[in-house]
Amino acid sequence: MRILFNERGKPLEPKSIRKSIATFGSSYNRTVGAIIENSGSGINRKVFYQNVATLMPNFKMTRQGPFKGVNYFDGKAVDPKGQISVCWQEVGEKVIELRNFLDAKKKDRARVIIEIPHAEQEKVASELWQIFKKLVSLCMGKNTLGLVAASKVLFAVLPEVALPVDNTQWRAVFKTIDYGDIVRQMAAEMTEWEKRRKTKLDSCDPFRPTTLPSIYNVMAMRARP
């Protein structure tokens, strides 16, 4: 419990989380809102391409490496190296299956990761880990292991359950490369925070639409050394 709790193990104040989100950056909030809204009715090829092309430039993943040049411009996904296409071909079907599973739960999409039973959380974490491993092999570059890009592709298309993880977070915050374990930790920590604060975490986000992982990501960035 190190993201939503201080070094003494006390859950952070809701106003502290609200302030962190408000000051994190309008560009992040706009971009995350756009991918959440765009995927509101589900995932298909068009939504997959658009969301990845929208998110990756904002996360500075398009200056070099496999996603170099990717952008969303004039209503179209720009994919000069065919990187989004490769990702879609490899994991698109599994992403759709997982989204359909979540939709069938009839839960609040913003909160679904902690509102489904623990056994179903385990299924989601396991499925994300399997998809993540396929993406990593596709996102490797000359100077990258692909971990960061893979996590951000997942967040772009499944923002209700996936978490984008940057280099410092892999090394110094989560200290694991098991993406499934990171998702499990995220769900457990958010559940514990709400239990102890008697407050819904999504009520701390002044922007809409939102998801719990998008909030947790802001706090995980704040927790970096």
Image: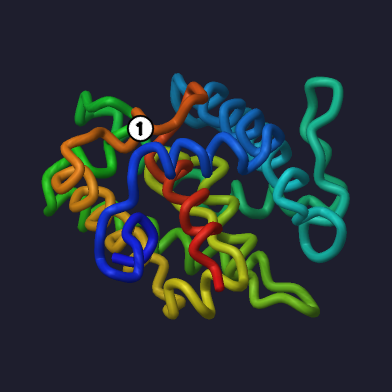
Q: Which residue is mark 1?
A: 202
Where is residue 159? Give x, y as percent: 47, 40
Residue 108 showing in the rendered view: yes
Indicate left or right for 114 with 219 as reference: left
Residue at image point 41% right, 67% down: 179
The residue sitting at 30% across, 58% down in the picture is: 125
Q: Quadrant of residue 135?
A: bottom right
**Residue 64, horizontal then vertical, whole percent:** 85, 63
- In-front residue for pair 16/155: 16
Quadrant of the rendering where the N terminus is positioned: bottom left
Instruction: Classify residue 86 by image quadrant.
Output: bottom right
Instruction: Give x and y (percent) for residue 181.
Output: 32, 68
**Residue 90 lies in quadrant:** bottom right
Q: List x then y, in percent, for residue 37.
A: 53, 22
What coloring was used for the rendering?
Answer: rainbow
What residue do we see at 21% from left, 24% from top?
106
Q: Residue at position x 81%, y 39% from top? A: 71
Q: Residues within 10 Å of mark 1 (few under 14, many from 20)?
A: many
The answer to whether residue 203 is left or right of residue 39 is left
Q: Nearer the viewer, residue 15 or 145?
A: 15
Position of 113 relative to 44 (above/below): below
* Numbered circles on residues, count: 1
Q: In the rendered image, which quarter contains the C terminus?
A: bottom right
Residue type highlighted by circle 1 = Asp
Asked whether residue 48 is in view, the answer is no
At mark 1, the secondary structure is helix
